């Protein structure tokens, strides 16, 4: 039988991927979880009908959300990842020798369990002794933290379902409080082709709280439009001027791409003004 | 009826777009031509089952294949476009006031006719008095030209069907001969996720002929993987060091993005070595 997984990324456009078999499928306490084995992308995690990560292209997202802030901060020691139950962001964070502790605040324990079983090259890092996995509400974790983290990475789903609170001004204010005085945060902020208004709103909201607010991009083939954005808010350091460099093994991020990823297409640049 | 156009970009992955109606459909002398009206992308030109251009995202490809070389050459006057029957590259070329003549060598007159009818905002530029439309074999046009052009842009389909000769070392040698001693050429060279070998081969072939050979990228949502590459070969000028700037109206290209588009993801950079 010829099985294809088709995701409508908008009402009128989507992607379709040939499926070998379904590995896991359940309604968790928070969302619909599907783990499928695809021919083109390897194992693929789908939440509420949206591709979260695939074995083949996961490195782009995970490297770019992590290394840009971690190579901006001069000495990141305490790092929080909100969401990110697949473990990919944690894996990249741990590549930085300065990091002493990486906390994962993931609301859905089933995402962690399924990722450990079916995405071992991504989730394996969660067993590292420097990692503190906390299954719980990231929003509450932020609200209860003060002056604690050097870097906070918001690896959320889209602003529907469990992640809806993670795209609010109150959340960004909480992040600012949870960060140390020279802290930095990055949030994934969807794509400029179909979600221009979201990017614009987040930029405006974050700018009110963080003196250095910028947008950068990366190419993620299994995400809508292939062009993904990340919003970075920094209290002290400038993500371009203060870029550190160090040898690190990557498949996407490079020293040159760090700054270049902030050079935006004109129609995307316009969303940040 | 709910109609969707699905393009298998590989054997196991593709895109799918909701269709309002079919505007044009024919077997030309060279390929299968479909012009469809889609909900997400506006009118869409499909050749041999591959999306060539759409009204909504065409500006990316057309701006990036044109402005990078035309802002590298100090004074481009004579420009040749091989392929590009939809007229989008010509439209961008004409934005440069130095250009005196822009020749279009398109093998398939039906592509031009259908584009003029159904993609008027793209093909309208073909009626400009500076444009010389020649319906014929671009490979032969190149072979018969010597020391003639400042810039040559190869806006071809994939290396199947009528475009197969346009991805050969003999063609690049012909381009070198057709260019003036300080000429520049750019060819679209597909995507690094599914066509890595092609990019690698073209880089090697072009490097043997052009002292300055580089690769740059752009995000095109309706093309496979969303990450498109362009190979630039230049006799004299360096596409980064010699970048000129001037005011020009664009939706994707910017002065900063010109250089930034040469900062490649690590796995793409590796294809150029």
Image: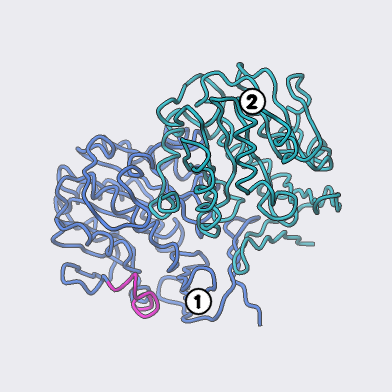
Chain colours: A cyan, B blue
Q: From the viewer's perspective, is residue A141 above or below residue A52?
A: above
Position of A245 with respect to A24 (left or right) is left
Tell me which residue sits at (43%, 40%) in the image. Answer: A262
- Per the image, is B116 magenta? yes
What secondary structure is the stretch in magenta mostly built from? helix
- Per the image, is B153 magenta? no
* Badge 2 element: loop
Tell me which residue sits at (45%, 70%) in the image. Answer: B45
Residue topped by disc 2: A147
Q: Quadrant of residue A121?
A: top right
Position of A253 with respect to A242 (left or right) is right
Q: Chain of mark 2?
A: A
* Badge 1 element: strand
Provide residue A103's location: percent of width, then percent of height.
72, 28
The answer to which of A107 and A118 lies nearer the viewer is A107
Provide residue A100's location: percent of width, then percent of height.
67, 17
Provide residue B230's location: percent of width, then percent of height.
38, 47
Mark 2–mark 1 contact, CB under 8 Å?
no
Residue topped by disc 1: B37
Query: From which residue to which does the magenta span run?
Result: B113-124
- Quadrant into which the N terminus of chain B falls: bottom right
Provide residue A83's location: percent of width, then percent of height.
71, 40
């Amino acid at each position: 039988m010829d099985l294809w997984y088709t995701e409508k990324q908008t009402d009128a456009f989507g992607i379709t991927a040939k499926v070998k078999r379904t590995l896991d499928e359940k309604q968790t306490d928070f969302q619909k979880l599907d783990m499928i084995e695809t021919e083109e992308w390897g194992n693929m995690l789908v939440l509420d009908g949206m591709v979260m990560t695939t074995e083949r292209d996961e490195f782009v997202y995970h490297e770019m959300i992590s290394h840009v802030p971690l190579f901006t901060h001069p000495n990141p020691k305490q790092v929080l990842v909100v969401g990110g139950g697949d473990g990919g962001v944690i894996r990249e964070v741990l590549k930085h020798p300065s990091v002493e502790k990486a906390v994962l605040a993931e609301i859905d324990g089933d995402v962690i369990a399924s990722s450990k079983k079916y995405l071992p090259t991504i989730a394996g890092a969660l067993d590292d002794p420097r990692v503190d996995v906390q299954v719980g509400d990231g929003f509450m974790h932020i609200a209860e933290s003060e002056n604690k983290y050097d870097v906070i990475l918001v690896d959320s789903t889209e602003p529907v379902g469990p992640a809806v609170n993670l795209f609010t001004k109150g959340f960004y204010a909480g992040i600012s409080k949870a960060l140390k005085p020279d802290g930095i945060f990055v949030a994934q902020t969807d794509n400029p082709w179909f979600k221009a208004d979201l990017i614009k709103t987040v930029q405006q909201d974050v700018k009110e709280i963080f003196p250095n607010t910028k947008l950068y991009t990366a190419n993620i083939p299994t995400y809508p439009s292939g062009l993904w954005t990340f919003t970075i808010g920094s209290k002290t350091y400038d993500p371009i001027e203060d870029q550190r460099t160090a040898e690190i093994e990557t498949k996407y991020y490079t020293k040159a791409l760090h700054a270049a990823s902030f050079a935006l297409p004109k129609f995307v640049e316009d969303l940040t003004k």
